[in-house]
Amino acid sequence: MSAENDPAQRVAIGISFGNSYSSIAFTTGDGKAEVIANEDGDRQIPSILSYVEGEELHGAQAKSQLVRNAKNTVTTFRDFLGQDFKAIDPTPCHQSAHPTQSEGTVAFKIRDTEAEEEHTVSVSEITSRHLKRLRNSASDYLGKSVNAAVITVPTNFSSAQKDALNKAAKEAGIEVLQFISEPVAAVLAYDARPDAKLADKITVVADLGGTRSDIAVVASRGGIYTILATIHDYEVSGIQLDQVLIDYFAKEFLKKNKSAGDPRENDRSLAKLKLESEAVKKALSIGTTASFSVESLAGGIDFTATINRTRYDLLASKNMAAFTRLVLHAVEKAELDILDISEIILAGGNSHTPKVASAIAGAFPETTVVLAPSTSPTAINPSELSVRGAAIQASLIEEFDLEDIEQSTHPMVTVTPHLSNAVGVLCISGEESSGIFYPIVDAETPLPVRRTAIIATPREGGDVLIKLAEGSRHIKVTKPEPKPKADKGKDEDDEDDEDDDSEEEEEELREKTWKIANVLSEAAIKGVKKGGKIEVQINIAADMNMNCIFREVGGKGGVRGLLAG
Ligand code: ATP
């Protein structure tokens, strides 16, 4: 029986496979994910292969070949998998092996053997070779042969892309147990922590990777994740941030060495400039200054310079603001308000940059938790979120047959019916005509669902009327009263006034309120004790049939109701 048929023989890991970097992880006996370093000691392994006289180099070793051996170095290929040549954007491959068309799909012409001639190697074959290297690194580390994996993919990876990746993985000796989407893996990595509170929440996963940014709004309801909206942008990315530094250092170099020429205009100089600029960018995530140093940058001249974080933040401010806009746009696309967002998980390598996190934190209310290294001491390394989630998922499912995995894990993403409004109760007593709405089952909760809540009744007790209702969330905006303009005095005072005005404008008060969309049923509970509490249990079936029980805590009896959806 092969490992594919026999779950007992599986050795499974988590793999995150990005256009820029890949990672591998496994879970220890106590369910903790551990990211594996490859033979070079790297946990973020560049998704790059390079060939030197028939020898295959991988990861960081392959990346350093971009200076001398760019034509035989293959980069940025994940998104090309399963795509038609005409559909791809080859721009990120400008300074490495160029993609070409081969039998409709994408391939690279490289010298990958000792022979002089070039071979056309398909993107599937390249992917397979890359995955094989990752698999070998994991096997060496674990001391046993890895043969299965959960692999993360972006939410917009098509089924053709997944099929191609599945095939390439198989070629590399890896049985794909499941593909999980990158944002769900990120939420899973956080939720699997021993101290995580598994409350219902709306999370935004904001991923600023090397070649793209991906935003997802994810609802977690009773441990089921539903993706409410996604945005993908290929203009806002790490490459753009690197370009900011490339331009800065190129100009600094030119200021001092005009006659040596622009290092951006020579392939080898540009490759050196790029590699060092990315290293400077990473250094600025930890330190407030970083130095740039390249031997023989252009015209045989060595170049050294320094930059501080404030300067970088300023130079990249447009790009960072664009990323924040994408996050806000995704919230809008999910038809939510920023007040609905419990937390923002910053993922992708560029989320290490403090300004990326602080710009986003500044656009959300203080109640939204921003999980990034610079804003939260307990944040998980954003470069490792995907792979940790994948490894955790692998450990959860590796013992099941593939068929069972397909069935049991479907609800992970958005196929179940959902509530469009919250369902809760209004509790009314005495003279009151309306009461406060207590949401019990949140909107976007997948069905079927059962929730129980304990509600304090109005203080005086007595007969209490409970209304089961659907509530829709509204945002109440209160603008501050405009201050009466002070008499204009001296010029200096005028300037102060202007400042005050502009600050006040931003200070509008935004609160969540509920509007009753529909009253579904009513029940009266008689003679409730003073300060008494009522337990409400709501069951909603997949076809929206509802069934509820109200009873006084500690009291006798209760009221039951059945409602057709
Ligand atoms: P994509 O698929 O979008 O290309 P990826 O998933 O392959 O991305 P990630 O590891 O998420 O890659 O992100 C890589 C990006 O993060 C690169 O632009 C890299 O320069 C940047 N990066 C990695 N570490 C840091 C750091 N410490 N500080 C700032 N940027 C970093």
Image (cartoon, rainbow, N blue to C red):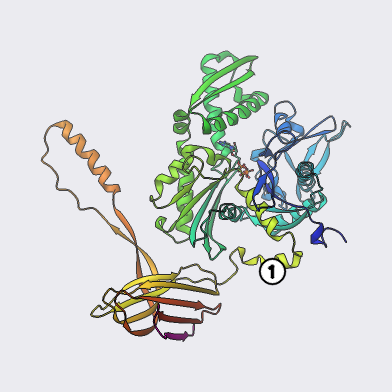
Q: Is residue 54 left or right of residue 315?
A: right
- Name the image quarter holding residue 276: top right
On screen, residue 175 above or below 561:
above
Rendering coords of residue 354 (x, y %): 48, 37
Mark 1 Cα-neighbour bin, 10 Å: few <14, some 14–19, many ≥20: few
Q: Quadrant of the N terminus?
A: bottom right
Residue 153 appears in the rendering: no
Q: Position of residue 174 (x, y in %)?
A: 79, 52
Q: Is residue 559 magenta?
A: yes
Q: Look at the numbered disc 1 and say if its residue's Cβ is closer than 8 Å to ligand 1.
A: no
Q: Residue at x 73, y 25 (%)?
A: 68
Identify which amino acid the numbered label 1 is placed on.
Answer: Gln
Q: Quadrant of ligand 1?
A: top right
Residue 317 against residue 389 in the figure, above or below: above
Percent x, y for residue 261?
Answer: 59, 18
Q: Nearer the viewer, residue 214 or 372?
A: 372
Which range of residues does the magenta coloring cover?
Answer: 554-565
Q: Is residue 118 above or below residue 233?
A: above
Residue drawn at the location 11% of the way across and 35% of the way down: 489
Q: Is residue 487 left or right of residue 553?
A: left
- Residue at the far front: name it: 554
> Residue at label 1?
407
Res 268 seen here: yes
Which of the 4 image quarters holds residue 487? Answer: top left
The residue lying at 46 percent from left, 38 percent from top is 355
Quarter where residue 267 is shown: top right
Residue 80, position in %: x, y? Answer: 70, 48
Q: Nearer the viewer, residue 439 or 395?
A: 395
Q: Residue at x 48, y 82 (%)?
A: 547
What element does badge 1 sit on?
Answer: helix
Residue 45 vs 398, above or below: the answer is above
